[in-house]
Amino acid sequence: MLNLLPLNTMLDAADINNIKSFLDEKVDEFNRINFIDLDPISIPHRFSLKQDIEIAGFLAATIAWGNRKSIIQNANKLMDDMGESPFDFVMNASNQQLKKLQFVHRTFNSDDLRVFIKCIRNIYKNLGGMEKIFANAATIDSMQPAIAEFKRVFFSIEHLARTEKHVSDPDKGSSAKRINMMLRWFVRKDNRGVDFGIWNESIKPSQLSLPLDVHTGNIARKLGLLHRTQNDAKAVQEIDLVLRSFDPTDPVKYDFALFGLGAIEKF
């Protein structure tokens, strides 16, 4: 069993190697097909068309806070309401169809959903799709500027001010957990069948950041990998440096380990 260290303990090389080995084992344990059904990634896994995967994944990630069972239940309802064809619905739904939508997940409601659909439609109709926006605005080692640019572009058409809170902005200090999670889904590609890898020709896994939340943050601190107490943009930068030292080409695979330890094993 790996020994837990007090917060702010400085790790030596042996500690770091032990932690890396432990996390590598947990990545192997949780990066498996049976992880899908109990995770919001199950929503885009309902689809095979690239645009359906993107839109289903983006909407599922958007409401991915709170109880996972409730997240999945509400996201599945949303896909049903969109006729099992989210891309077609986004592009072709009439104003009357949009008015009929009834949806709520915590503070995300029907009005927010209608705004999201119109903003997504604009991105696919006029701007070449979500992948293009993220890929063009990324830097060689970070997706955080691209997330900020995505929010700017997303809300570049008329919208409700209240809806802006549902897309995070790292430039304003947010960890942007939900969009970083979505990027992991779309960019990472391995032989495990969990993440999709549908954007891996334009974005590299090495550019990704950890989806930092209460689970991944708490485990990172327990292991001595993260010292900042807030789960914010600065904490993302700190943990990214550590995980990139573990695996420079695929640092975010450790999301499986940190999340699995925190949310599933209650480590």
Image: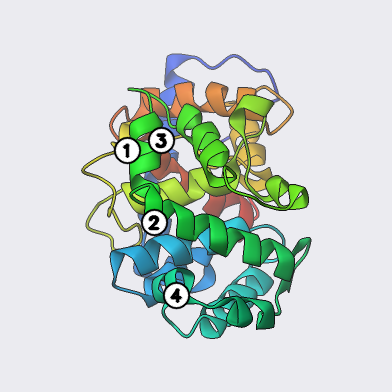
Tag 3: amino acid: Leu
| SS class, disc 1 | helix
Q: Quadrant of residue 108?
A: bottom right
Q: Which mark is residue 205?
A: 1
Can you give x and y, in whole percent of width and height, for residue 152 in the image?
A: 56, 37
Q: Relative to 80, is 245 above or below?
A: above
Residue at the disc numbered 3: 208
Q: Residues within 10 Å of mark 1 (few under 14, many from 20)?
A: many
Q: Nearer the viewer, residue 33 or 124?
A: 124
Kind of residue at disc 1: Pro
Residue 212 position, x and y percent, is: 59, 40
How far from the left and from the top, in percent, is residue 182?
47, 51
Badge 4 vs badge 2, beta-carbon distance below 8 Å: no
Judge left or right: residue 204 versus residue 101: left
Residue on which the image places disc 4: 92
Q: Nearer the viewer, mark 4 or mark 3?
A: 4
Q: Mark 2 or mark 1, which is nearer the start of the sequence?
A: 2
Q: How far is disc 1 from disc 4 in space, using C-alphas?
A: 33 Å
- Regarding mark 3 in the picture, which secondary structure is present there? loop
Q: Is residue 179 left or right of residue 34?
A: right
Report the disc number at residue 124. Answer: 2
